[in-house]
Each structure stands twice: as structure tokens, then as C-alpha cells.
Image: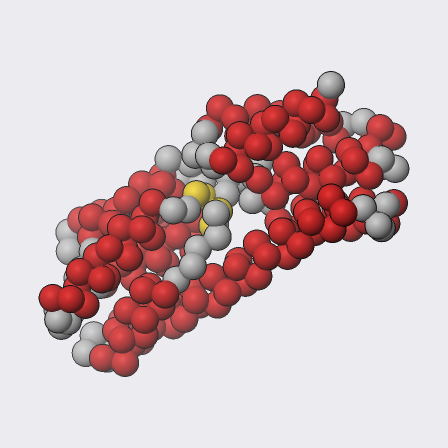
Amino acid sequence: NEGLTIQKYTQAVTQDPTDTTATRVLNEKLEAYKSNPSRVMNNALALTNIANAQLALGNLDSARLTIRQASSIAPNSGDIQRTSEEIDQHLAIRQRFQANINQLQQSLVKLQSDPRDTAATGNITKVLTTLQQPTYIDASSALVMAKALAVMNQPAQSVQVIDKVLSTNQASPEARELKAQIQAGAFSKDVRATPMQQEKFRLKSDSLTRHFNIIQKTP
């Protein structure tokens, strides 16, 4: 049963988004499932399976459109409502994250003009220590985060973020160039903080580098 197979791999990817085999199989099964529109267009269960798979893969906008289709067919379905609410929660997290990335980018631009801008440095510290990442982020946002970590004297964590980008099909000359610059110490600053603040930031930066995945572009 194709629907059960989709559910199986959706659960696997949800539990471990770093499982590249499950991710690849889910993408393949999903494309095959959608290749016969007449089979899914008026089938609320099939559309819900697709929406859950898209959510697991980080394709939130597609998931929202799909679950709306399902809801138009079965507006009173509890499963559809739960999936819709979960998608909305992930979209809200993504929106807040993008606003934080924009703040980091603005502060980095200010520091480029004036490396002594303590307000910009303070804003970077505040954003990074309170940042809540989506399960998946895009490569350009990851590189902004990497540069901000480098500015805060966290070159090892910064390079880990860039390496995640380089390990995907979004590897780019920009990512390689940024990695080389960071390894050469191009963005390091003399960040003044108490030992307790430094330890808090180190623990947070370690978490930042582990708990996200890069959205894979479909070839």
C-alpha cells in the first residue's frame, strides 16, 4: 500500500531528519504518489499523507497548500486539523527565525562599517542566544548564522554550520570562500564577556550547530 509506505518513511524522517536514506526514499515515493493526480486529487487521506510527508521534508508552503486541499474535501477531519495546526506552528517558527536572520545580517553590515559598534555586537549575542531554529533552514540563512558565530569568536561552530551546507546539493563557491575566510580569522572580534556569559554562549552555539538541517533543493 503506497499510502502506508509514505506514512512509514514520513515517520522515519520526522524522527531523524539526518537519515539521508529515509529522506531520499520518501522524496521518491512522494513523487511517484503524486504522479497520478486522479488518484489523490479528491482523496482527503491521500492528500493528508502527502502534506505530512512535505512537512517532514521541510516543504512547509507545499504542505500548507496540500492540507488546505484535504480540508476542502473533509473539513471536519480531526487528522487534517491536527496536521494543519502542526504546519502552522512550523511556519510561525520559520517566520520568527527569518526575522532573526535579518537582524543578524543588519548587525553584520554595521560591524563591517564600524568594527567597534558595541550595539551591533550586543544584538548578535542576543539573537544567537535566543534563536529558535526550524528543523530545516535554507543555505543562505545558514551562512549568515555562520558569519555571526565567527564574529562572536566561535570559529569551530561556524565551520560546522558551513560544512552542513557544503554536504548538501546547495554547496556553493560562496560557502567555500566563507569557510576559508573564517579559518583565516577574518571575522574574529575581541568579544568582551564574563566567564559565565562565555560559557552560556558556548553551550548555545554548540546547540545551534547541531539542531538543524539544510533544505535540499530538488534537482
Q: Quadrant of the C terminus?
A: top right
State left or right for residue 51 relative to residue 158. right
Identify the image quadrant of residue 5. top right
- Above or below, 17 relative to 129: above
Image location of residue 128, percent across then percent down: 33, 63
Of residues 125 and 71, the one drawn nearer to the viewer in this rendering: 71
Q: Residue at x 73, y 18 (%)?
A: 1
- Above or below, 179 relative to 91: above
Of residues 61 and 219, the one drawn nearer to the viewer in this rendering: 61
Q: Residue at x 65, y 29 (%)?
A: 7
Q: Residue at x 25, y 47 (%)?
A: 159
Of residues 165 and 112, the one drawn nearer to the viewer in this rendering: 165
State left or right for residue 167 relative to residue 72. left
On the question of residue 120 being in view, the answer is: yes
Image location of residue 19, percent across then percent down: 45, 29
Identify the image quadrant of residue 160. top left
Image location of residue 30, percent across then percent down: 67, 30
Image location of residue 178, percent across then percent down: 28, 51
